[in-house]
Image (cartoon, grey):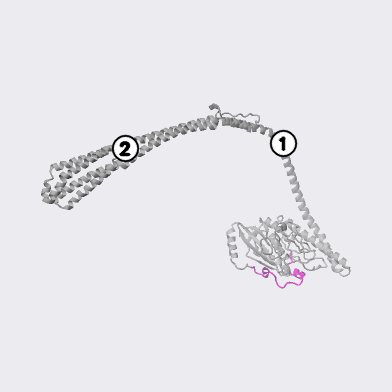
Amino acid sequence: MSGGPGRWTLRRRVLALLGLVGALLLGVALAEAVVATKNRDYTDVLLMKVGPLRVHGQDMLNALLDQETGVRGYAVTGDPEDLVPYEQGLARERATAREIRELSDTYPGIEADLVAVEQQAEQWRRTVAQPVIDTTRTSGTGAGQALLTDESRQRFDELRDAVGALQEEILTAREATARNVERTGNLLVVLLIVAGLVVALAGIALLTALDRMVLRPLTTLAGQVREVVTGDYEREIAGTGPPEFQRLGADVDAMRRKIAADLAEVREARERIEWVNTQLQRQAEELTRSNRDLEQFAYVASHDLQEPLRKVASFCQLLQRRYAGRLDERADQYIAFAVDGAQRMQRLINDLLAFSRIGRLTAGFTDVDLNGLMAEVAAQTEPARQYADAELTWDELPVIRGEEPLLTNLLVNLVSNSVKFRRPDVAPRVHVSARLVGDEWEITCQDNGIGIEPEFADKIFVIFQRLHAKDAYPGTGIGLAIVKKIVEYHGGRVWVDTDVPEGTAIRFTLPVRAGDVEAAAGSSAGAGADESPSEPAGAAATGPVGAAPSDPAGAAATGPSTGQVAGAVGERPAGDGTVGAEAAAGSVARTPAPAGPPDGGVSESGATGGRKEAVR
């Protein structure tokens, strides 16, 4: 934005401040880099040159002392071995001189002192050391010692003084380098302090600028917004400070005006919503009351319909038995139609009663051993299985929490359906198994029957849904709806597994008992290790018991007598396995098999065994 500093944007102001601080810090950083480089160079000289020079100066003195000691020792003993220190000292002297010369290239004074030491050493060897060695070698030790006079000692002292001057020069160079290191180090500290001051001043300036350019305008704007939030929608909002905050204030004020304009509409909408909620709540209460009344009506109506139906069916059968052959064929057909219609209506009423009682009439959950339950299921389905030559097997099943009558009804429905929906000329095989999946038992009832197409997998659990005509597979269409309601009442799920090679596999889940997951897993693993499924004791566990009867009436007569309803009419075995109202309350009806000649059996008093049917 053009104009003076007062019209600068916040971004431009912050960038200007940061640029100034950055330039100052950059200058300080460059100065520190230069000083640090010099400090490092001086330190390197001190450590890599001057320090070793001091050591080499002392080595030079030690080498000369070894030479002087070797000469004196040889003059006393005449033993060539005593000349070894002299020779070694001479070699060390020359090596040390080379190293000092390499390190003192920037120190002319040290170089000059080194030359003086070398000259003095060479003069001492020429005038003292070598004559003593030669004289001792040719004339003996006495002649050699005679040459070691005070003058020879004085010459060596002069050589020692020259080495001392060299060491003094090295010490002077070290002190000068150390002062340079100290000076550059102090300058580095000063520059660091300056950098710290720049950063501190920059921080203070930045805080001050933020307070003036950001915090104060934001505080003013926030105060105005709070007044609007409290309900004063007429309060005008004006931004102050940098142009960004002025534009922000204008935008917020535009939003305030829009909110004020929409507030009336919001209030009207809220009133309409409250009115609609009131109406919905009233309708929900009406629906709840209506459903309760309908449920009561269905329950009472079902009971009230039982007696007339029993009478109609019983007396129609009496007519059929007493006047058989006395009337024409059409009259016999009409009576048979009446008997069949009364029987189907009675089964439908009983199934509806059983469906409505699930979850409403409860005795509470208990521990139920499904193995014992399967033995009961085998007994109840025995007549239908005998008629169809069906085989029923099951693996080791778990103990779960549930209502035993409902679970019995559930399994009877599944087994009876498997027997009922069989393939022609193929003996039915029904197998019940269980496996642990997480915290649920997944129980499967699988058969080798006609199967279910995948597109009908969900439809079969809908009440009154049928996939076949009534003349092909009789029933009311409630059996699997009862199964689904029982499973969901126990907190599980039920579905059809269409991915099986043949037949139908209906799977459902039941929760594992609390604290029993590990034990259940161990039991499931042990059962899976067996080569064949375990079977409970008794003939009912393994399928057909005895020879199949020649007619279904005879088979039905061998079934259990529980669940009989006084006055209910007889019927041909249907095999759908639905347990009606008596089974839902705790008693179980007999389950006939499909497709058989009507037994026509009714006593003179009209009391017969009442049997229920269901289809998938």
Total marks placed? 2
Identify the magenta region.
Answer: 535-562
Secondary structure under badge 2? helix
Q: Main secondary structure of the magenta part?
A: loop
- Relative placement, left or right, of 203 versus 488 is left
Q: Amino acid at mark 1?
A: Glu
Give the quarter of the figure containing the N terminus: top right
Q: Position of residue 460 (x, y in %)?
A: 72, 58
The residues tagged by marks 2 and 1 sit, at their Cα atoms, a distance apart of: 89 Å
| Residue 213, picture quadrant | top right
Secondary structure under badge 1? helix
| Residue 247, picture quadrant | top right
Q: Is residue 258 at least partly visible in the picture?
A: yes
Q: Amino acid at mark 2?
A: Ala
- Between residue 465 and residue 368, name the one nearer to us: 465
Look at mark 2 in the image and give the residue it sits on: 178
Q: Position of residue 593 (x, y in %)?
A: 74, 66
Tell me the residue at 22%/41% (across/down): 117
Q: Nearer the viewer, mark 2 or mark 1?
A: 2
Please say whether residue 392 is one of the residues in the magenta stretch.
no
Residue 40: image tag? none
Please say whether residue 542 is one of the residues in the magenta stretch.
yes
Look at mark 1 in the image and give the residue it sits on: 268
